[in-house]
């Protein structure tokens, strides 16, 4: 069972690839290792997160600011926690 088992997850994978390398280096590994295990609400939050501009994602993922929406704050926290565990 791979991370690209259907078209929607494949599209999310490609949308995780960003113009800003610092953002991509956090999103792609998280997607590859964690996305399939997320509850549906977190999957939807991840998809919504990808609608944001790279600079906004960068600030959130670096902890410089926090999303005001709780569901986005939760997924950002999950990504940050995953990233810190990989270091």
Image (cartoon, rainbow, N blue to C red):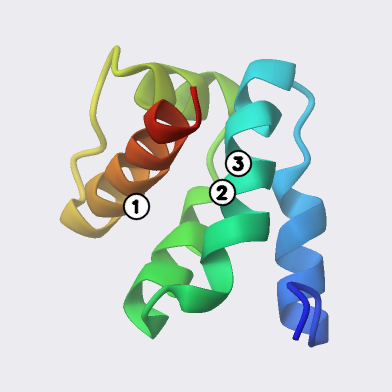
Q: Is residue 82 left or right of residue 68?
A: right
| Relative to 65, residue 42 above or below | below
Q: Are marks 3 and 2 in contact (CB under 8 Å)?
A: yes
Structural distance between the alpha carbons of marks 1 and 2: 11 Å
Residue at x-position 46% and y-position 25%: 56
Quarter residue 19 falls in = top right
Q: Are marks 1 and 2 in contact (CB under 8 Å)?
A: no
Residue at x-position 69% and y-position 31%: 24
Structural distance between the alpha carbons of marks 3 and 2: 5 Å
Query: How dense is the environment of label 2, judged by Cα within 10 Å: few (below 14), some, or many (20 and up)?
Result: some
The mark found on residue 27 in the picture is 3
> What secondary structure is found at the residue carrying circle 1?
helix
| Relative to 31, residue 39 above or below | below
Q: Nearer the viewer, mark 1 or mark 2?
A: 2
Q: Which residue is mark 1?
A: 75
Quarter residue 68 falls in = top left
Residue at x-position 56% and y-position 76%: 36
Q: Which residue is mark 2?
A: 30
Q: Please state the horizontal and vertical placement of residue 73, each as a whole percent of the image.
A: 24, 45
């Amino acid at each position: 069972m791979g991370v690209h088992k259907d078209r929607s997850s494949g599209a999310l994978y490609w949308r995780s690839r960003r113009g800003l390398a610092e953002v991509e280096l956090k999103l792609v590994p998280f997607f590859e290792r964690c996305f399939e295990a997320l509850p549906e609400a977190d999957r939807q939050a991840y998809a919504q997160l990808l609608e944001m501009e790279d600079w906004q994602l960068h600030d959130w993922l670096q902890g410089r600011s926090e999303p005001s929406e709780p569901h986005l704050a939760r997924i950002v926290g999950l990504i940050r926690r995953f990233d810190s565990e990989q270091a």
